[in-house]
Amino acid sequence: MSIRTSVVWDYAPAPESADHVRLRDRYGLFIDGDFRDPVAGTYEPTINPATEEPIAEVAYAGPDDVSAAVEAAYAAQPKWGALPGLERGKYLYRIARLIQERARELAVVETIDGGKPLRESRDVDIPLAASHFFHYAGWADKLRYGVNAREVAPLGVVGQIVPWNFPLLMAAWKLAPALACGNVAILKPAETTPLTALLLAEICQEAELPPGVVSILTGNGDTGSALVRSNKIKKIAFTGSTAVGREIQAALAGTDVRLTLELGGKSANIVFEDAALDQAVEGIVNGIFFNQGHVCCAGSRLLIQESVRDEVIAKLWQRMRRLRVGDPLDKNTDVGAINSAEQLSRIEALVVAGEEEGATRQSIECELPERGYWFAPTLFTDVSPAHRIAVEEIFGPVVSVLTFRTQAEAIEKANNSRYGLAAGIWTDKGAKAFEVASALQAGVVWQNTYNHFDPTAAFGGYKESGFGREGGPAGLRPYLEVVR
Amino acid sequence: MTRLTVRKTYKLWIGGAFVRSESGRYDETDGFNFPRASRKDVRDAVAAARKAAGPWSARTAYNRGQILYRAAEALESRASVMGVPREEVDAAVDVLLHYAGWTDKLHAVLGGVNPVAAPFLSFSLPEPTGVVGIIAPDAPLLLGLVAELAPVLAAGNVAVAILSETAPLPGLDLAEALGVSDVPGGVVNLLSGRRDELAKALGAHRDLNAIVDAAGDPGLSAELDRLAAETIKRVRHGSAAMTYEDATDDALERLEAVTELKTAWHPVGA
């Protein structure tokens, strides 16, 4: 009689079908309601980071294209801004509905263009993008109530630059409030993830959005730089790294162009000894391995109370070893591909620095596909607060563990960062959770959960994580001028 | 025999103490000497402000409101010695009073419960940005300063203010009025000296969170913007408030400029 000594949990492949995806071979720039070739004629392929195969060619906007988009937007704004709020809202409701209708297609494209697991693009990115348009559609005819009964007016043409970690969702966060407030917008998607924004341009056409109200300028950092420096732009909204945010803030010095910045983070996820530890471990995993850790608010600094350190790390490691890394289109995949070769090398460089500075590295053993950009989920222990992996944003599936003895020490360590985007608190004591939450310098604090987002809830950073808020009525304010 | 007057020595106000500039430098105006603060004084003031920031913001809104009201009382009682027209003092007192009343209203106006589509109690609350640098205008000397200072304090922040370079005495007199009120040491720090030197040192300070610039100098404004970018400071430029209305009609914008919104998520059930 044979005795089973272990169970191997093997999963059959469960790939999502890509049959319903309608992608063109080549996408121009979306200006004045139509796709057009870039003036300089530059097209570059966008790559699937899980296979390194090109998916489609995408135009790179140069200075002339940026000017053309700004002129078209400038011409379209007065009419759009003068529409009754109810009518503007109807367009946004249409867009929300069309996102829902094309949700499965958008999810697949988001996954092949960016590398994130389909489970996340399907269950998080796309539904939240639709709900942001729904939420702000309803604000369009109620703006006064969202800004404490002040008399307000749109700003005009706004420039919006979004990152590659949540491409369509960030586009929705930016466009929905801007348009609801009567502005027209020029969106610059990230270089490595332009496709869902281009599908959104098609959706704008299908929704019969007036030409010029939304422009989509694909390209690289030069495109963004030209957009920031354009005449007639009244506001820039940027989500991305603190380094680029700093450049933009400096570039706008001495001008009256408004600015909101949603930048980097090194968010503390604090586990107290009285937490439900199994639940906390799930939250730690969600906090740092969600979207391969390509999350500005990722819980990348794990602060564990000393008395439960060994237990939490043992449970975490057990859980990490069961993470399924691989084909992002597989519905069972937990951790997908790293977004680009460039990002992979940044992660690798910081991990090497972590080892060199004396921290202990554990990466899970898993079969990684031969092609594509991959990084195995990694845990660092014996980390000192001065180590680079405890200070700098890694933006990858790497968690650094620090410990603390008292609540005061936890707060001090959590706040000991130039960033202040988010934080997590794991404890079963409600009074303690509220006390710690109020002491943390972070724009979002999650208690016994992590990485939850909602269009009604403000999101944004303290300190060098940026300024301004997105979501809820606070998200209207950066897109409106108070009139007196 | 004629009586010899006792002349007043003006001092900086840092960390609740009246001090000379550590540099030993001074300037003279209207027959009075006043300190010419140094960059080191700016650093000391920011350090004192940082130390005071936590306790000040941790006070109840009611208590902060009472302290600002007490500051208004102190200023009213010294109206005749402030060195500016009586009407200006009246307006400054009223501005302090107006913002004293904001401390426990701001949460209701800017914050609220977020009806998220998941089983969580999610709410967003305004919190102070932290240590705020103020560049005061050259006119009106008292009202122009109080109009910038009051909203910063009402929102729970602490301040380091660079006074008018040409006429700092009303600002230094305000320090004495606040010094005998209940404003805790370090919550307000007032420095006289060369604006360009001090404002740049303040704007470049890495432990400063925000700048409120009412000096009305475009060159300095642009320089402050550039310095602010280094550590992503929040910056508000405004023109000097000439009247009570100027200082309060845009009260919410003034308060928003030095306020952060914190969103907290607490699970319901499970």
Image (cartoon, coloured by chain):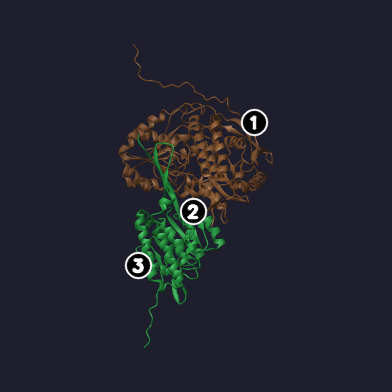
**Badge 2: how crowded within 10 Å, few (<14), some, or many (20+)?**
many
**Badge 3: how crowded within 10 Å, few (<14), some, or many (20+)?**
few
Chain letter matching colour green: B
Residue type of the residue flagged with mark 2: Arg
Labelled disc at residue B180: 3
Q: How far across and down, in percent of the image, does residue B230 sit? A: 51, 52
Residue type of the residue flagged with mark 1: Asp
Locate residue A293 relative to residue A275 in the image: left or right: right
Q: Nearer the viewer, residue A151 or A428?
A: A151
Q: Nearer the viewer, residue A124 or A40?
A: A124
Labelled disc at residue A25: 1
Farthest bottom residue in view: B1
SS at badge 2: strand
- Chain ID at mark 3: B
Would you identify the image quadrant in which residue B123 lies?
Answer: top left
Q: How far across and down, in percent of the image, does residue B235 sit? A: 50, 55
Residue type of the residue flagged with mark 3: Val
Q: Which residue is mark 2?
A: B234
User: Looking at the image, which residue is at 38% across and 33% down?
Assistant: A316
Labelled disc at residue A444: none
Q: Nearer the viewer, residue A424 or A478?
A: A478
From the image, state the color of chain A: brown
User: Looking at the image, which residue is at 44% across and 61% down?
Assistant: B149
